[in-house]
Image (cartoon, rainbow, N blue to C red):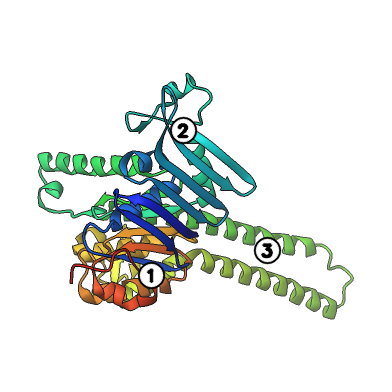
Amino acid sequence: MIHNMIVKGLNEKYDYNLTFFHDINILTGRNGAGKTTLLKLLWYLISGNIERAIDEIHFRYVYLSGDGFELEINNEIVEDSTHDLVQIKYTVGSDSKDALVLRSMKRIVTKAELEQIKEYEDIDVINRVIEKATDSSLFFPTFRRIEGGFSITGKGKRNRYSRINVEEALNTVSNELSVSRHKFISSVSTSDIVSLLTEKYANISEETNRLHTELTNYIEEQINENVGTNNNKSDKTLLDDANNILKRIHNQLNYVTEQRETLLKPFTVLSSLIADVFQHKGIKVTSVITLGEAKEAMFSDALSAGEKQMLSFLCYNAFSDNCPIFIDEPEISLHVDWQRILFPTLLSQSQTNQFFIATHSPFIYSKYEDREIMLVDDRGGF
């Protein structure tokens, strides 16, 4: 959870002192107020991309605090006789450090260069400490989902190569910016959603198979323990023993059923939401995985642009927990009715995630007036 942020000189003109809410934080303001820049800065700092924050975003100073960590960066150039330096202070648990990081030509220097200057801190070390402390996050940029169809998903040989090139480019961007469990989301159509749900379903299937194997072994043990021990027992004793065995097996069966339902809960909640929200009532993700009603389910890559956006938010939210989620302009491609229900629906999934969004949509920010953070007095837009 992220608590506070102080930033000075953002885009060389804005100073902000912000306290964040535990559930949803809605950044509003006219174009140029720094909403997207602030989202990027927040995510870069917690996701192991501090060097990108220093290199890409104009700010003099930033302080950030959250569960178990504090981070402070003085980005005004500190000069010694030969080098430009950035001052970074951080506290994670009981570990505190005040470091100078070498910067040259407005970039963080490479490891090879740092090896020659031992007295300065390695930015990668600081990144690892912070990203482990913050654990996980998701960032949805405005270009998060490039629509399939048209020439990039055609049937010709040339078009297949075009799709591969577009998909590879987006995957490259995503992989370059993603660090460990901090994910940058960009994809063609629903390919990332298919990968996400396939991975989660496989993990759940493996775990449920393990539980069923343990249940089978437990039943065999209970039976085998009593085989050959029934000689000279009265009928009443034998009946009592049998009832006790059945009771223990029944209790173990209930335990396995509860564990299986817990594991499948994200899929169960997703299926219920799909049936309630989507016109099609069912979405076929793969030949094995269907969300909602299987009868007449539509394949995910045949959904409309807005449906793909909604599906993406629902799926990533379902499989994240205690995770900061950053969304730039969530209203993209969404009908106003879905803009109204988007965050009530996401919050109803009860994943205790913390949302940071930048929006111009009154259909979104009017639902949460007490969670709106106006960066400037003028919202612009509508």
Q: Is residue 284 visible?
A: no
The three-letter amino acid code for the residue at tag 3 is Ile
Q: Would you name the residue on which mark 2 appears? A: 101
- Farthest bottom residue in view: 236
Q: Would you name the residue on which mark 1 appears? A: 346
Q: In which quadrant will I find the C terminus? A: bottom left
Q: Is residue 211 visible?
A: yes
Q: CA distance from mark 2 to mark 1?
A: 40 Å
> In screen coordinates, is 3 left or right of 380?
right
- State whether residue 40 is above or below residue 288: above
Describe the element under mark 3 as helix, strand or loop: helix
In front of the other: 178 or 52:
52
Please name the residue shown 32% across and 28% down the image. 105
Q: Nearer the viewer, mark 2 or mark 1?
A: 2
Describe the element under mark 1 as helix, strand or loop: helix
Which quadrant of the structure image shows residue 145?
A: bottom left
The disc placed on residue 176 is none
Q: Position of residue 270 (x, y in %)?
A: 38, 69
> Mark 1–mark 3 contact, CB under 8 Å?
no
Total numbered labels placed on residues in the image: 3
- State whether residue 161 is above or below residue 137: above
Q: CA distance from mark 3 to mark 2?
A: 61 Å
Q: Earlier in the sequence, mark 2 or mark 1?
A: 2
Q: Position of residue 175 (x, y in %)?
A: 35, 41
Please name the residue shown 51% across and 45% down the image. 130
At label 1, counting other C-alpha atoms closer than 10 Å, the crowd grade (few under 14, some 14-19, many 20 or more) is some
In front of the other: 43 or 204:
43
The disc placed on residue 219 is 3
The three-letter amino acid code for the residue at tag 1 is Leu
